[in-house]
Structures are given as C-alpha cells and as structure tokens.
Amino acid sequence: MVNFIIAFLVLLLFVYCHTFRQFVRHPFKFAVSLVKDAVLYIWHKDYNKCPTGVLNAYVAHFGRGKTLSAVAHITALYGKYNNKRVWDDSRNKFVTQKIEILSNVRFLRVPSVPLISLMDITARAQHNREIDLEQGTLTVTLILVDEASAQLNSREYRNNFDVDTLNTLITCRHYHLSLYYTTQKFKFTDALLRGVTQQCIKCHKFWRVQKLIGYNADQVEIAGDTSLVKPLYVQSFFVTNKHYGNYDTLATVDKLVKDAKDGKMMSAQEILAARGNAELALDAVTSPSRRLRRMRRMRRGDKG
C-alpha cells in the first residue's frame, strides 16, 4: 500500500511538476548544472545584484500609502545594494554597483536625482553606461514617477513619451533599470505605460499598518477591476516615523499646480485619448477572483 502511494505521488509530480519531469529525464545534466550554478552564484556574489527589469504600479487614493510604499521599497533597495561588489559578465570582472534614484519625489534619507521629463530615462541610461566603463562601476537606476496619471497629462512629460523611451522601458533589464509609478486608478494611467506594466499593487493603510496586494497588470487591464482578479500575493509592513521621513511630495504637487497655471497640461480630449479605452474581456481572465467566478456561474445559470 505504501509503495502504491509513493508511486502515485511520483506520477503526480511527473505529470504536474515540470522541474521534477526534467530531473527524471536528465538527472546527470540536472545535477551538474545545479552544482555549477550554485557555485557561480556564490563565487560571483549574485546575491549582491539589485533586481532590475521591474515595471510596477502602486495604486490607491490619497492617504492610502501608495507613495509611502514605493519610496520605502526603493529606499530599502538602495540601503541593501548600493556600493556592493558584483560580477559584470560583459566585462568579465568584479565592479562596484551604484544605485541611482531618478524621481519627481524628493527623497530625504538617500540621494536622488530630479526627474524632469521622461526623456531623462533614456539619457541617463546612455550616460550611466559611459560612466560605468570609465570608472569600473555598474549603475542601477531606480525610477519613481509619483502621480503618473496626472504627470503624464503635462506636455513636458507626455511629449517625451516616444519610441525611444518606450523601448528603454521594455528592455529596462538590459539597461539595469526599474520603473515604479503611483496612480490613483490604474485605468487613468497612459495606455502605453499600462501596456508595459508588470504588477498592479493595490495599497491599503490602516493606522500604521500598510497592506500591499499584488496583481498581474495584464489581468487587471482586461478585467477592469482588481476585485475580479486573484491576487499574486498579499504583504504588509509596519509604518514607522522613519518611513514618513523618507520623502517630500510637496515638489510633485507644486509642479502639477504650476504646470496647470502655465497652461502646460493637455486638453481633456488629449488626456482621454492617451488613456485609451481598455477592452474588458472577463472571459479571458485566467486568474479570476471568487467574485468573478461567482459572476460567471450566475451568468451560466441565467443562460440555462
């Protein structure tokens, strides 16, 4: 009986677990590659490499902690990975990793460079590559666009959201970039930016408890509502006074007010056109929430 249960479990693993299936099919290659990769991971100090290629949106209304959460995450990455020795495959040697923060929010506890327009993203990527070759460094650029749905209504930002900028974002891992942005509603964000977003992170704050619920951005796009999508994860952290002191958003608000007074904001028609009309396709949602599954059952019952 025990042998039957073990055989049944092994069969289930072979059918449903691709990793186990490849191990059974190629045990020698699997074992050798596992040891080799583990040794190189330690030898090259890959644990010191800052994650790049991230394009995430923090979504919430005012006071729900979207900017606080984004700044806290970026500040933590800076503290953990700045000035760490990492292996650069292109130069085949160890270099010093430098973390650069490009943001329209003023960081108070770590250094940051003001983000004036989206053209800065491509310009900094090219500039940093030249500096890295000269100084033996590897610059990772973490970009934060606070209130992106409003910022991209400014011609100063929107006119620079061109093919070069979009290509840089799509290949951001190649350029050692990560982009984080905040918005009150995901659907209010520019359609081009939504199209390259990986995760939509819903923010909720009660007192000093900050809750983050991560969703697949593509699923949110076609569902139109996070409540219809099964979350990828749920996280939380306790907000301290240090978190509140990480940043100053007044510069962002002041600039938006100034742009509006100076007539730099796009017209209502241009803003709506940039947002696009996302086509909802609830039947195409592959990770439905319980609410959506219930809606589907009710709809099937009505048809029957």
Image (spheres, rainbow, N blue to C red):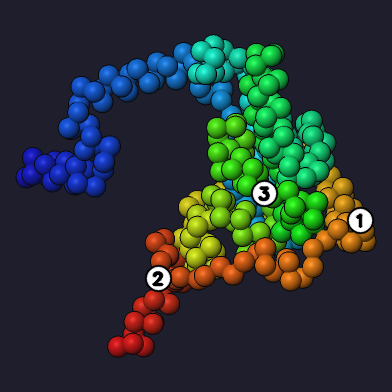
Q: Position of residue 196 (x, y in %)?
A: 56, 50
Give the amino acid type for the residue marked by disc 3 in the picture.
Asp
Mark 1 or mark 3: whose residue is earlier in sequence: 3
Q: Is residue 175 above or below residue 226?
A: above
Give the amino acid type for the residue marked by disc 1 in the picture.
Lys
Image-quadrant location for residue 148: bottom right
Q: Which mark is residue 283?
A: 2
Residue 204 appears in the picture as rendered:
no
Residue shown at 19%/28% (left/top)?
A: 26
Residue shown at 87%/52% (left/top)?
A: 255
Q: Position of residue 170 (x, y in %)?
A: 56, 43
Mark 1 or mark 2: whose residue is earlier in sequence: 1
Q: Position of residue 149 (x, y in %)?
A: 71, 59
- Spatial CA distance of label 1 from label 2 is 44 Å
Neighbour class for label 3 at 10 Å: few (<14), some, many (≥20)? few
Image-quadrant location for residue 118: top right
Dot 1: what SS? helix
Mark 3 or mark 2: whose residue is earlier in sequence: 3
Residue shown at 69%/14% (left/top)?
A: 134
Tell me the mark number nearer the camera, choosing from 1 and 3: 3
Give the amino acid type for the residue marked by disc 2 in the picture.
Asp
For disc 3, the marked residue is 162
